[in-house]
Image (cartoon, helix red, strand yellow):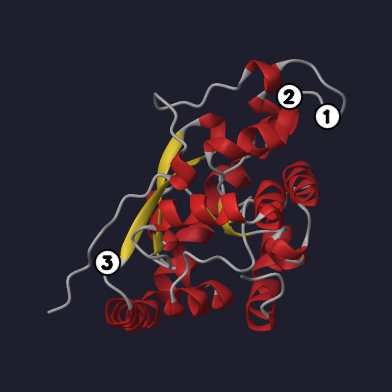
Amino acid sequence: MMSADLHSYDSDGTTASGRVFTLPESVSSSSPGLPVRPALLGPARLFRYRAVKRILDVALVLIASPFLFLLVLVVAAAIRLDSPGPIFFSHRRIRGHGTFFTMWKFRTMCLNSAELLDEHLAANPAARSEWSQFHKLRNDPRVTRVGRFLRRSSLDELPQLWNVLTGAMSLVGPRPIVAAEVEKYGDHFADYCMVKPGITGLWQVSGRSGTGYQQRIQLDRKYVQNWSLRGDLIILARTPRSVIRQVGAY
């Protein structure tokens, strides 16, 4: 019988003490652009965001659960056969109001991923620049054979449906970020904190990693400032096409 092994992974070696992320002084100080707004001005104050969106999230996950359960078993078996190590791993990410939560994914990397990344970035200036700009690598030496397929097909995100059921995430929202990315958001981090992070979102259906990081931040701002249930449904409808075309996926 296959065991669903778990692995906790501290993304990029970045840690932050406590349960709430405190904005660094270099970020929280005033700067040009959108001013930091109080969370009360975000969509979370709306009944349709707190209740209707939540009901929609849970209902869609439960409706799809029979098919998804079989898919999870197939993916888990492929990971187990492809490389040694656990099937799942967890990331510590930031959600609304700056609190941390544990985000789950299928493991797509080898066990010594942190060491491989350090060595690769030290030996490749171009890769260092790409990592600094996108926080991702197109040719990532850490990724396994099955992991490459899972990332291109976005199947590595399936375990995050558990995060949706527990209320830490939504089906639609900004992608969850790690502590090291907060400084890149600057004052716009306040916008990120006004909603739940999502499995899919405006960034994913707008080119994903094919867009620059600052474009991603602007897409997150646009989503938060113009949130509507209709917009969420449009993003959900466009997501399968983006996944099939693998636009910006790696």
Q: What residue is pinned by disc 2?
A: 37
Residue 241 in the image: x percent, y percent?
69, 80
User: Decide: marks 3, 2 in contact (CB < 8 A)?
Assistant: no
At horizontal 58% and vertical 49% (from top left) the residue drawn is 122
Q: Residues within 10 Å of mark 1 (few under 14, many from 20)?
A: few
Residue 140 in the image: x percent, y percent?
56, 65
Mark whose residue sits in front, 3 or 2: 3
Q: Which mark is residue 85?
A: 3
At horizontal 65% and vertical 38% (from top left) the residue drawn is 192
Residue 240 in the image: x percent, y percent?
63, 78
Q: Is residue 219 shown above or below 26?
A: below
User: Decide: marks 2, 1 in contact (CB < 8 A)?
Assistant: yes
Disc with the residue nearer the chain's start (3 vs 2): 2
Q: Which mark is residue 34?
A: 1
Tell me how far mark 3 sits from mark 2, CA to CA: 43 Å
* Quadrant of the rendering where the C terminus is positioned: bottom right
- Toward the left, the furthest residue is 1
